[in-house]
Amino acid sequence: MSQSTASPSTAPLPFEETEIAIVGAGIVGLSVAHVLTRLGISVRCFDAGAAGGAQSAGGSRIMRAAYNDPRMLWLARKANTGWARWEEEAGRPLIERTGSFLIVSEAEAELKRLAGLDLKVRFVSPAEQEELLPVHRPWSRPVILEEEAGTIRARDSIEWLAATLGDALHEHTPVLGLTQRAGHVLVSTRSTIYRARRVLVAAGMQTPMLSGAMGVRVPQVYSVHQRLLFPMTGDLAARPMVSFRDKSDHRHGVLYTYGLPALHDGLFAVGLEPSDTDRSGGGHPDQVIEHTLALAAETLPGLDTSRFTIESCVSTSLEHPDDGAPWESERLEVVRRGAVDFFAGGHLFKFAPALGEMLAGMVLGEEVPAMLRPE
Ligand SMILES: Cc1cc2nc3c(=O)[nH]c(=O)nc-3n(C[C@H](O)[C@H](O)[C@H](O)COP(=O)(O)OP(=O)(O)OC[C@H]3O[C@@H](n4cnc5c(N)ncnc54)[C@H](O)[C@@H]3O)c2cc1C
């Protein structure tokens, strides 16, 4: 019997080509993929589950620009314009532009600071508080209204963005690994290997895991968070309502409490941001629920606090700088390794249109924007 002398096959390997691959179809990945598809760029956006099924799940998010860091304020403003453009494109409202209440201890100084940043802010009387947020008892301290803030229709936004991607969106397709090669990156999924010129990883809590497998450290942590959804009493659910963030009441050791219409089933969401010491691992869900219930019973007479559902979710942020300052999620970061960019941060929903543009420009060959470079 003669042995085969055939040389190894020189047929091209069965890879699928794409210009850009995006790992993660949360609000960030979807926004970037949306901008790229609108530019006619070949893109694939992969999600291990359903689009928007992780941190980006749920009916609503607060849109506001009142940040301490001027770069974040700039980004929120840019995003605000972007949301209006998306609404036009979508042909439906994606934000309820109702405004948002901010309650802080040094209210006069904060109002002055925010007004100095050109934000439309003013104090609201107790009567107006009742008008704008009828589920809440008026506060005994000054309340600032950020007039151009609002409540994002989160679920609608995810659905619309996902629909604009068409075949570029691959749900239930986990990316198992990324392999850097000369001039391209191999993106391994269960059934197909994609060859991409560049890759953006916006995989939420999984980003450090994917980066770690490539020997890259992304300084992102996550915490588990509970918020409660209550039915509104009477006909309150039919009324437009502002959201609130109360940073003045630190009982139970919380940094701040917040509430907003859930924008589905007539529910109102109430949550609290625990202190730093409560942030690790799964936090203390029993205490968080107990404190949220006590808070709602005391301050939110427009809610039926005898009936509620618990929403547990993960939220990511960059590692807390060990400088003793109170924790605020006010930093975003991209760690670049060759043709792969890892994006990390928290409280991202509001920034979506601006982040979409910024990160799309970046993966198309621009430098990492200054505000996203590691400090
Ligand atoms: C309760 C709650 C309230 C919030 N309130 C606000 C608010 O009021 N305003 C605001 O601006 N922000 C808010 N945030 C934060 C905001 O929702 C998140 O920052 C944002 O949704 C994160 O989006 P993302 O796309 O980065 O991550 P995610 O939505 O987590 O998306 C990452 C995706 O990556 C996918 N993935 C992971 N690993 C892989 C893999 N190997 N292969 C393929 N896919 C993978 C996941 O399935 C997931 O869908 C809130 C968050 C929570 C949880």
Image (spheres, grey):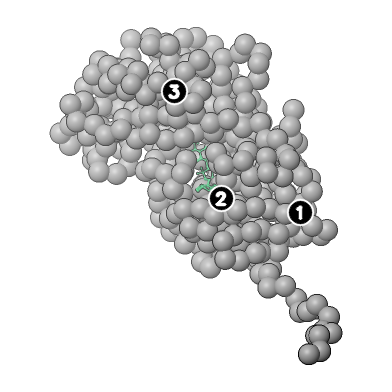
Q: CA distance from mark 1 to mark 2?
A: 18 Å
Q: CA distance from mark 3 to mark 2?
A: 25 Å
Q: Quadrant of the C terminus?
A: top right
Packing grade of label 3 (10 A; few <14, some 14-19, many >=20) is: some
**In the shown orientation, is residue 107 left or right of residue 212?**
left
Q: Secondary structure at mark 2?
A: loop
Packing grade of label 2 (10 A; few <14, some 14-19, many >=20) is: many
**In the shown orientation, is residue 229 left or right of residue 20?**
left
Q: Nearer the viewer, residue 318 or 84?
A: 318
The residue that mark 3 highlights is: 283
Q: Are marks 3 and 2 in contact (CB under 8 Å)?
A: no
Q: Secondary structure at mark 1?
A: strand
Q: Earlier in the sequence, mark 3 or mark 1?
A: 1
Q: Nearer the viewer, residue 44 or 36?
A: 44
Nearest-to-viewer mark from 3 and 2: 3
Nearest-to-viewer mark from 1 and 2: 1
**In the shown orientation, is residue 4 left or right of residue 75?**
right
